[in-house]
Amino acid sequence: MAKNRDGVNLHIQAFLAKCLADENRLRILLSVKEKKSVSTIVEELNLSQPLVSHHLKELKRSLLVSVERRGPFVYYELTDDRILTILEQLNELGEDLLRCRTTF
Amino acid sequence: MAKNRDGVNLHIQAFLAKCLADENRLRILLSVKEKKSVSTIVEELNLSQPLVSHHLKELKRSLLVSVERRGPFVYYELTDDRILTILEQLNELGEDLLRCRTTF
DNA sequence: TAACCATATAAATGGATATTTATGTGGTTA
DNA sequence: TAACCACATAAATATCCATTTATATGGTTA
């Protein structure tokens, strides 16, 4: 896999970051910390069903969520909790940056 | 500042993630780990000068880089090293996810 | 099989954003 | 001041992406 001199894969990073770059997708991602059906997510977040399906498809493509069909229901679940840690760090960093800015 | 029940600010997270969601912007971000002038970045990354300026403007807007003018030169530098840690974790997570997928 | 439910997909639309090309601005030096 | 350099900005374009609306698929139950 191609890496630059930092031993880091820009493509992977940008790809995953893209998944985190939309508020609705983030809400869905956080929502499936516990395994949920599509309709449950739709109700919980008050988003249209096709929109939720669309974002879930993206999240699945990024392997951040996994899918399981049970009868007519389809359940989605967060694949790896580390994404939550990363999000927390993004949040903390963002707030610190804002604090510094408004301090000066 | 508005937070959801996870004590987390979706807006900040999505905003910062957007900054990381473009490969060229990532390259620029990593490049200014050491303070550099615009022209240096342009040469180093082989990107057009307006494109680099454009992305630097975005990075500055996100407070991820800081600016300093010295004579005719303008120097940009990473504001906070924590973004590098976050990028490393994104990379590690991404590679692990890929590994799992190709394993099964 | 028909009707129904949950979800996925397609098509259409609007808005954002990456990139290029052209031009402006501000500092420096002759 | 004029010419020049470094950088920023504007305008134009093209691509991508979020969202909506409409429709299809696949499973269930009558």
Image (cartoon, coloured by chain):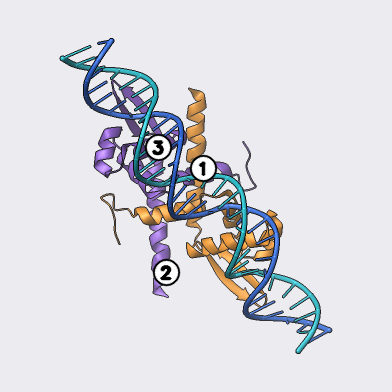
Chain colours: A purple, B orange, C blue, D cyan
Q: Is residue B66 left or right of residue A60?
A: right
Q: Chain of mark 1?
A: A
Mark 2 vs mark 1, CA separation in Å: 29 Å
Q: Nearer the viewer, mark 3 or mark 1?
A: 3
**What percent of the width, then of the height, locates residue D1?**
76, 89
Among the two numbered marks 2 and 1 on one chain, the one whose residue lies closer to the N terminus: 1
User: Which three-letter amino acid code belongs to the residue tagged 3?
Assistant: His
Q: Which residue is mark 3?
A: A54
Q: Is residue D23 left or right of residue B90?
A: left
Mark 3 vs mark 1, CA separation in Å: 17 Å
User: Which three-letter amino acid code belongs to the residue tagged 1?
Assistant: Phe
Q: Are marks 3 and 2 on the same chain?
A: yes
Residue B43 quadrant: bottom right
Among the two numbered marks 3 and 2 on one chain, the one whose residue lies closer to the N terminus: 3
Label 3 sits on a secondary structure element that is helix
| Along the line of sight, the residue nearer the viewer: B82 or A25 | A25
Q: Which residue is mark 2?
A: A100
Label 1 sits on a secondary structure element that is helix
